[in-house]
Image (cartoon, rainbow, N blue to C red):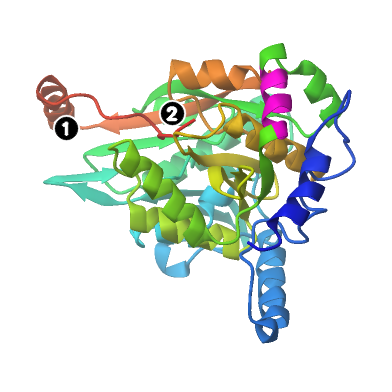
Amino acid sequence: MQNLNSSFGSARALLTPSNSPDSTRSPFTSAFSTIGTARVTAPAQVDAETAHRSALRGARFAAPQLYPDNGATPASVPLPAQSVFHEAWWLDLATDGNWRAATVRRGNEVVGEMPYSLGRKGLWRTSQMPPLTRTLGPALKPFAGDPAHAMLDRIDITTRLIEQIPEVDSFYQIFDPRVEDALAFGLNGFTVSTRYTLQFAPERNVEQLWKGLNGKTRNLIRTGQKFLKVAPIESPAEFNRFYESNLTVRSRSNIYGADLMQRLVSAFVERGEGYLLGAYNANGLLVAAIGVTCDSHAAYYLLSSRSPSAHGSAISVLIWAAIQDAMKRKLTFDFDGIPNANTYRFLSGFNPTLRPRLVVERHKPLWSMAKAARRLVLPKKPGWFLSTM
């Protein structure tokens, strides 16, 4: 922390717009050469660690690696709609290894995959969304030919994926926004509904995005940049301690599980598939933080936390930095769901695009009855994710 002030000066200069932001540079990678990786303090470890992370980072853009013993066969190339949440390492950590993947092959080629979790809630066998896993759903090879035949092909392959899912009392998945229909699920007895996320497409440049911000949001960011200095957080452990301490102050518990969240955050940082970004006050004290996980398609705003004493614009400043980085790297920036009306009002100030995310579910009658009875007795739990904006 001794060199925070000099580093922050460079980072802040990149983050503070004059009339419009610089769309050619990442907002913080110039000040810090590696985004989202923990600092290695022992010089002898630097070269080995850099090589290790470079190899992991390169592996992300090759085929997703799925464990054979989880019923999956690695595809030769990533299938459309596969995200970081489909990857074996993510699912293994998020479910403690309790997941499988349905796979459809034609010859030696994988043309469809769909991972799913397996778990128990008391007497019930379930397949739900794992903690911190925002989307899953089928990933299918693109289909050639006319639209009618392509639809029939998608239905056929998706039905074959569905047939591989074991019988459970409750099945629930939120699909990646790139999955545009769930017709096969509807035809196979699933209920299909819609949730939403907010996104920025990589085709939009930073200057356009800055001009499109709500005036109040733009002023918040300008004001916050006067009081806050932005930099990558040195280690996942620091982020997790900060996150937990802010929950404790608010008398809340970690809805993901502190240990599980720590493992996932550490994994995506160490693999180079995400980063942690902090806002520090004039005394060098961390007052707000966000976690972003990435794949070759998108950067996902996954976690956020701020101390009660933080400036009201702290999270806005951090989000704006992450948006700029995503645009520089030609990634979609995904705000990753709309858990409640207050969050929507906050995020809508950035003027993103609303995108649907399909939801499929199927429940046995006894499960549905038990769920309905529980809702009458116990208060409703929080939604998809809890952030302390």
Badge 1, how many Cα within 10 Å: few under 14, some, many 20+? some
Does residue 278 lie above or below 334 as drawn?
below
| Residue 360 part of the magenta-drawn span | no
The residue under label 1 is 367
Q: Give the quadrant of residue 172.
A: top left
Q: Nearer the viewer, residue 221 or 54?
A: 221
In-image side of 102 versus 127 (left or right): right
- The part of the chain drawn in magenta is 217-226
SS at circle 2: strand
Residue 51 at x, y percent in the picture = 72, 77
**Among numbered discs 1 and 2, the one appearing first in the sequence:** 2
Residue 194 at x, y percent in the picture = 47, 21
Q: Nearer the viewer, residue 237 or 308?
A: 308
The residue under label 2 is 359
For the residue marked with disc 2, what is the amino acid? Val
Q: Give the quadrant of residue 3.
A: bottom right
Residue 155 seen in render: yes
Picture residue at 45% right of the left edge, 50% below the top = 242
Residue 288 at x, y percent in the picture = 54, 41
Picture residue at 42% right of the left edge, 55% below the top = 241
Does residue 26 lie above or below 177 as drawn?
below
